Amino acid sequence: MQTGVASVPRRGFFCGRHGHPLRPYHALLVDTLLPALRLDLNAPAPDDLTQLFFSPVEELRLEIGFGGGEHLVSEAKRWPDVGFFGCEPYLNGVAKALAAVDRAKLGNVRILPGDAWELLEWLPNGVLSGIYVLYPDPWPKRRHWKRRFVQEDTMAAFARVMRSGAELRFATDVDDYAEWMMFCGSESPAFTCTRQTEAEQREPWSQFPGTRYEERAKMEGRTPWYLEFRRN
């Protein structure tokens, strides 16, 4: 496994990607609810980020690449006093998450339908108590590994925005990506691995709802990895 990362363009998340046409209800939510929940990165981050939410929150977490929002919404329901930032480049996934947020009437979710790197750069130092990166694009061909979102510079960006004791969670169904995630996390002096054995790394987190991608991976015979690090 390589021990360094060449300088490459930012990886993995870009704004406004489209898939199939949106259903009328989803399109309506993109037009009406998304403007209220969308993070405005053109304005400086406020001194108190908890004031960005429509219900009172005491701490902040971030999910990068939330897909259809299954995990994001589940966590927001389970932790009503936590404010969740969700970042997802695909508009279809954003629309599905908006529908779930609307049904549950959640006031502790804000969304960025775009580039996670821009959000990481916008966030102040030491504000997050948790980050989730679940099933990012694996870029399976070795010559494309440099395009994977998780790299050494990503770990440095995570370290900057996380407070001491915060949890960083990765999930993937690709064995060599799990190995790479472990390398990046273990090489960073800012983090300590809290799941050392393969048995621990194969065990889903308590009350983890899974995702649609995870369900498909399991049906196709791939066993996920659940990696965890603590910010020192």
Image (cartoon, helix red, strand yellow):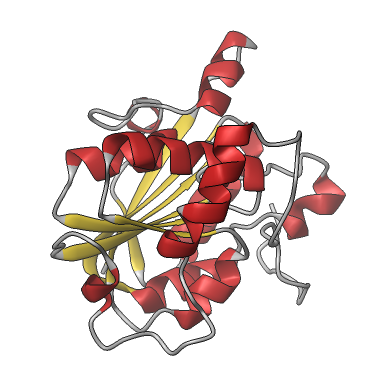
Residue 171 visible in the current orientation: no
Residue 60: x percent and y percent? 26, 64
Residue 172: x percent and y percent? 54, 36
Using the image, determine if residue 72 lies above or below residue 193.
above
Q: Which residue is painted at 54% across and 85% down in the image?
A: 42
Using the image, determine if residue 154 lies above or below residue 105.
below
Rendered image quadrant of residue 89: bottom right
Quadrant the C terminus occupies: bottom left
Rendered image quadrant of residue 118: bottom right
Q: Which residue is painted at 68% across and 62% down in the image?
A: 15
Task: Locate residue 193 relative to residue 187 in the image: left or right.
Answer: left
Using the image, determine if residue 225 lies above or below residue 91.
above
Q: Which residue is painted at 18% across and 59% down in the image?
A: 55
Q: Which residue is painted at 52% across and 18% down in the image?
A: 215
Residue 90: x percent and y percent? 66, 48
Residue 37 visible in the current orientation: yes
